[in-house]
Image: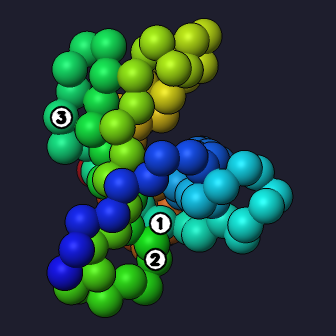
Amino acid sequence: ATTRWLERGHLRWDGGQWHLAESAPRASPEQPGSLALAVDGGDWMLLHFRPIGARPWTPGTWLALGQRDLGSAWHALRCAVYSPRPDPAGPSAQAPADPPA
C-alpha cells in the first residue's frame, strides 16, 4: 500500500460525519468518511481520512493542516476534530440519562 497525501481539497464536517473532496469544492464529488487525529502540534495537526466502505488495506488520505493556512477557521476545525461522534446505532441504542429506579 502506498501513502496518500492531499495537497489541495475541501474537508467538511456536517455535525455527524466528515466529507472530503480532493480538489476545489464542487469540482470533485465528496466522499463521506471518518477522520482520526494522528498528531496535534498545537498550531498544526496531522489527520487521517478513511472513506466509508474502504477496504482495510486501503491507505486512506493523510492531511497536514496548520493554523497559518486556515486562519480564522482553525479554531472551528479543532473543535470539530475533538467533538464527540454520534453513536452510529442512533440515540435509541444509547443508555437513558436517568435509569429507572
Q: Does the CB distance between marks 1 and 2 fall below 8 Å?
A: yes
Q: Left or right: 42 with respect to 72?
A: left
Confirm whether residue 19 shows in the render.
no
Judged left or right of residue 56, residue 64 is: right
Residue 64: x and y, percent? 34, 37
- The quarter of the picture where the N terminus appears is bottom left
Q: Secondary structure at mark 1?
A: strand
- Within 10 Å of disc 1 (Cα), the crowding (few <14, some 14-19, many 20+) is some
For the residue pair 101 and 40, the one nearer the viewer reads as: 40
Q: CA distance from mark 1 to mark 2?
A: 5 Å
Q: CA distance from mark 1 to mark 3?
A: 19 Å
- Residue located beneath label 3 in the image: 39
Residue found 40% across the figure and 31% down from its top: 65
Task: Please tell me the numbered disc located at residue 52.
Answer: 2
For badge 2, the amino acid type reads Ile
Q: Which residue is mark 1?
A: 33
Report the residue at 59% width, 49% height from top: 9
**Residue projecting furthest to the bottom:** 55
Near mark 3 (Cα within 10 A), the count class, few <14, some 14-19 or many ≥20, is few
The disc labelled 1 sits on which kind of residue? Answer: Gly
Closer to us: 88 or 53? 53
Give the secondary structure at mark 2: loop
User: Helix, strand or loop at disc 3?
Assistant: strand
Q: Nearer the viewer, mark 1 or mark 3?
A: 3
Residue 8 in the image: x percent, y percent?
56, 46
Specify which label sits upstream in the sequence, 1 or 2.
1
Residue 17 in the image, given as x and y percentages of width and height:
54, 57
Amino acid found under the numbered disc labelled 3: Val
